[in-house]
Image (cartoon, rainbow, N blue to C red):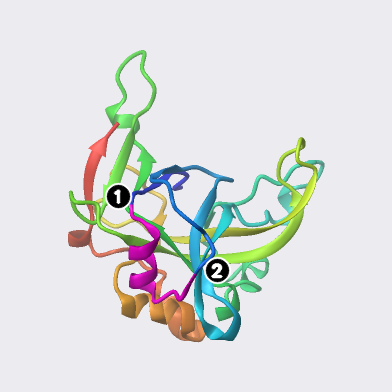
C-alpha cells in the first residue's frame, strides 16, 4: 500500500499537462507527501473547467472500521471499486488526478541489521517526470485529529490495482493506478465509469523503474 510519494514538479507544468484553467493551490513546495498531508489534485470545477486545488490525503473510512474510534485518519488507497462505500465517489464529479514524480513502498529485503526498513522509490524514469494517480475526492465532515476537532475539508485517495513485474518483488499486493498521458487523464476525468474503469490496471512493466532505495 502506497503511503508515501514525492512531487517535485511545479503548478504550471501540472496545469499545462491536465489542461487546468484555475490554480487554487498556490505555489507548490517540492517534497514528500504523507497520509493526511495537504496535497495538490486536479478535478473538474464549476463550468466543467479543470482546477488545481489542495486536499488532504485520506478518504472517509468505511463505518465498520470506525466503531469505537473518535478519529478517522482516512483511507489513502482504494482497491475495491465495487464496494458500496466507494461506488458513490466513482462518478465524474468525484474523480480527480493526483500529480506525482515518484512513489515509495517499504523494501524489507534491503533492510540492514539494526537499521530501519528502507523505501524503494518508483518513477517513470531516472529523470522522474510528471505522472498522475487516478484518484477520487469528496468534501467531508469528520475528526481527523483530536486537537483539531470536527472539520469540513476536501479529502482524496487514489485507486490501486495488482502490481506489475517491477513493483511485485517489493510489494506483492498492489500498486497505484498511474496515468501517463493527457488522453488517459481525459478519460479518467470525463468518461462514464464503464469506460473509465479499464484504467484501473497495472502500468506496463517497461514504463516504470526503481530509481532509489533509501
Of the pair 31 and 170, the residue shown nearer to us: 31
166 or 186: nearer the eye? 186
User: Is 154 placed left or right of 23 in the picture?
Assistant: right
Q: Is residue 74 above or below residue 51?
A: above
Residue 81, percent from left and from top: 55, 68
Above-or-below relation of 213 to 95: above
Residue receiving disc 1: 167
Instruction: Left or right? Give the position of 93 relative to 127.
Output: right
In which quadrant of the rendered view does residue 32 lie? top left
Whether 66 is drawn above or below 47: the answer is: above
Question: Is 10 colored magenta in this rendering?
Answer: yes
State the mark number for residue 140: none
- Residue ID for mark 2: 81
Residue 78 part of the magenta segment: no
* Element assignment for label 2: loop
Q: Position of residue 65 (x, y in %)?
A: 71, 49
Q: Residues within 10 Å of mark 2 (few under 14, many from 20)?
A: some
Amino acid at each position: 500500500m502506497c503511503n508515501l510519494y514525492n512531487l517535485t514538479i511545479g503548478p504550471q507544468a501540472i496545469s499545462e499537462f491536465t489542461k487546468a484553467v484555475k490554480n487554487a493551490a498556490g505555489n507548490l513546495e517540492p517534497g514528500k507527501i504523507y497520509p493526511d498531508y495537504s496535497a495538490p489534485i486536479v478535478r473538474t470545477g464549476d463550468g466543467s473547467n479543470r482546477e488545481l486545488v489542495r486536499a488532504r490525503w485520506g478518504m472517509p473510512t468505511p463505518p465498520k472500521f470506525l466503531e469505537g474510534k473518535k478519529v478517522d485518519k482516512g483511507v489513502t488507497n482504494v482497491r475495491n471499486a465495487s464496494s458500496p462505500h466507494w461506488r458513490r465517489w466513482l462518478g465524474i464529479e468525484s474523480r480527480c488526478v493526483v500529480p506525482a514524480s515518484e512513489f515509495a513502498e517499504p523494501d524489507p529485503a534491503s533492510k540492514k541489521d539494526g537499521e530501519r526498513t528502507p523505501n524503494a522509490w518508483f518513477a517513470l524514469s531516472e529523470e522522474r517526470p510528471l505522472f498522475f494517480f487516478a484518484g477520487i475526492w469528496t468534501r467531508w465532515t469528520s475528526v481527523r485529529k483530536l486537537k483539531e476537532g470536527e472539520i469540513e475539508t476536501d479529502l482524496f485517495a487514489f485507486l490501486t490495482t495488482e502490481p506489475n513485474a517491477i513493483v511485485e518483488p517489493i510489494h506483492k499486493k498492489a500498486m497505484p493506478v498511474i496515468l501517463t498521458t493527457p488522453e488517459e487523464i481525459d478519460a479518467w476525468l470525463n468518461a462514464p465509469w464503464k469506460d473509465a474503469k479499464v484504467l484501473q490496471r497495472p502500468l506496463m512493466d517497461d514504463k516504470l523503474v526503481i530509481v532509489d532505495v533509501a
